[in-house]
Image (spheres, rainbow, N blue to C red):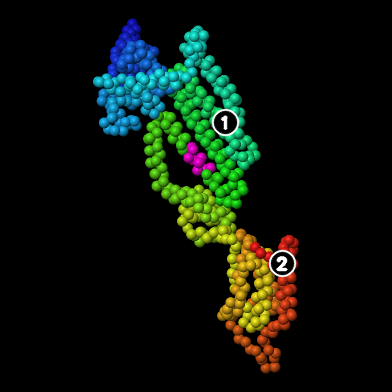
Amino acid sequence: MKKLFFLFLFISSFIFAQNNVKVDLSNPNATLYTHLYFLMPDSYDIAKASTTINGLSKKEANEKAKKIKAILDGKGLKIDFDEVPKDANYLDTISESDLAIDKVLNRYAPFPIRLPEVYVEKIGSRWYFSKETIEKIDGIYADTFTWEFTWFENKFPKLFEETVFGLLIWKPISTILLIIICIILYFILNPIIFFILKNIQKLFLKKTIYKSSDLLHELARPIVFIFIIRFIRNVLPSFQLLNFNAYLLIGINIAETIFWIFLFTKLMKLSISIYDDLTKESHSKLEKQLAPILHKLLLGIIIFIGFLHILTIFGVNPTTVLAGASIGGIAIAFAAQDSVKNLIGTIVIFLDKPFHLGDWVVIGGVEGSVEKVGFRSTKIRAADTTMFQIPNSLVSEAEINNKGLRIYRRYNTELGIRYDTPPKLIEAFVNGIREIIVEHPNTRSESYNVEFTGFGDSALLIMVNVYFKHLDWGGEQSSKHRLHIAIVKLAAALGVEFAFPSSTLMIEQLPGKESLAVKYNTNEKDINNSVKSVLDEFKEMDHKIDPNISSTPHDD
């Protein structure tokens, strides 16, 4: 008996507490609570709920009040009353439409980002739904519930009344039908979108040829899914799932954001593929190196923007997100100053193009071939195969000697021959070197210098200044080798000896002995024969290497 009494007392107090809730329009919190409370199934009283609408007839006010509640349920918007102000004189200080201080109004919008048109305002001493809300609510309702089941409800009234385990049977049936429609839409839209993309490619990118259409298929899929998700989002409010709508719509919005990320990722991949195709004909290897760097940079930007958008889906104010991103970006920039400087240096390198991949360069005392330009550093392979990594910030500021951009490779050296070499042999030796240079397949025959330029401490000095056509380091060394061998052979044939730093004590005649002085063959005929023999051998060696080389003097 005691238990029954306490149960009766609890039920009575609960009913009394429910009936004790009165209409209260004294502040934004009270007005919104009054509106929603009296539209709940357990406490439904449309007359009390419609008191939050000012200036309309009872019938019109009832209709508007129900539509506001339906829109909130349809969009999955749930008011957090802990966040709604209880101040009767609350001022809207964050409105973007009224910037002047004298226009700051007593109003409050529970969803300023997703539903800014619906808000309450103070009229006299009470708070009501605003005049703007009342004027726009029919249009918002029509946009929210684009799909109506009125015709089906009138045609099959029992279907819309039948329940299974307390759930109206038409809702699961409609959900299954929606899934089937989405699957059909996918198989219909996918080939259509692919066909459109393929024709756009042919129209604007006639010169670009792809080996396969995989990239276009990858681009078409996220577009189709975005269309399907938007279709679901338009239909979903009509299912009247009430509290489930909030979670379903959040999930749908997150899914749409993810598919947008996929779409931009695939679009970026397609654009980089087009860039690769267009740069195939380019001789600049540095431009080809730009593609992977752009891919990483753009991918990071796309994912970051997508992450920020997902935050706004969970109700974070976009201004707060951008401010946080800016502050975070500044903090990261300070924490990683060197990385930021290197990234800027990378951008400067690709804009200025001071070198290309494979160029032989001298940067800050490091000499070698450019192998790779990355986000952070440039890799230089030295002649001894050592790998140097120079930060791009230093590369962009350093003095760069790009030997790879030379039109020709200049080679200058001095030959020292003995002081006792006769003038005729000196002249023959100089002329012979000149003819060797002319016959050399990798030198500029119209631009060279071979002259007897002076007297050194231990030798007569002959300057040799030539220009090689090979621009790579290995080709230059090979050309030098062939030139040196020919000069050494010429010297041996003429009997010209190379000098080296030394101190010589010359005894020209010992008693009873022959003179120790070097004897040179200065016979002009012998000299000419010797020079001719060396040149013939040099030409013959050229023909062995390349039979197409002409034996006549050549130009560049």
Magenta span includes 299:
yes
Magenta span includes 56:
no
Pinpoint residue 257: horizontal percent, then vertical percent: 48, 31
Callout 1, which amino acid? Arg
Q: Nearer the viewer, residue 66 or 80?
A: 66
Q: Residue at x 55, y 31 (%)?
A: 222
Pinpoint residue 287: horizontal percent, then vertical percent: 56, 49
Secondary element under disc 1, as helix, strand or loop, is helix
Q: Is residue 379 above or below residue 309?
A: below
Label 2 crowd bin: few (<14), some (14–19), many (20+), radius 10 Å: few
Q: Residue at x 58, y 77 (%)?
A: 453
Pinpoint residue 433: horizontal percent, then vertical percent: 66, 72
Image quarter (top left, top right, bottom left or bottom right) of the N terminus: top left
Question: Which residue is situated farthest in the top direction here?
Answer: 1
Secondary element under disc 2, as helix, strand or loop, is loop
In this rendering, does residue 218 appear at all? no
- Give the residues in magenta: 295-303
Numbered disc in front, either 2 or 1: 2
Label 1 crowd bin: few (<14), some (14–19), many (20+), radius 10 Å: many
CA–CA distance between discs 2 and 1? 66 Å
Numbered mark located on residue 221 in the image: 1
Callout 2, which amino acid? Thr
The residue to which callout 2 is attached is: 552
Numbered mark located on residue 29 in the image: none
Q: Is residue 31 left or right of residue 457?
A: left
How many badges with numbers are in the image?
A: 2
Q: Is residue 282 left or right of residue 81?
A: right
Q: Nearer the viewer, residue 59 or 491?
A: 59
Image quarter (top left, top right, bottom left or bottom right) of the C terminus: bottom right
Q: Nearer the viewer, residue 138 or 66?
A: 138
Label the magenta part by its dominant secondary structure: helix
Question: Which residue is situated farthest in the front direction here?
Answer: 203
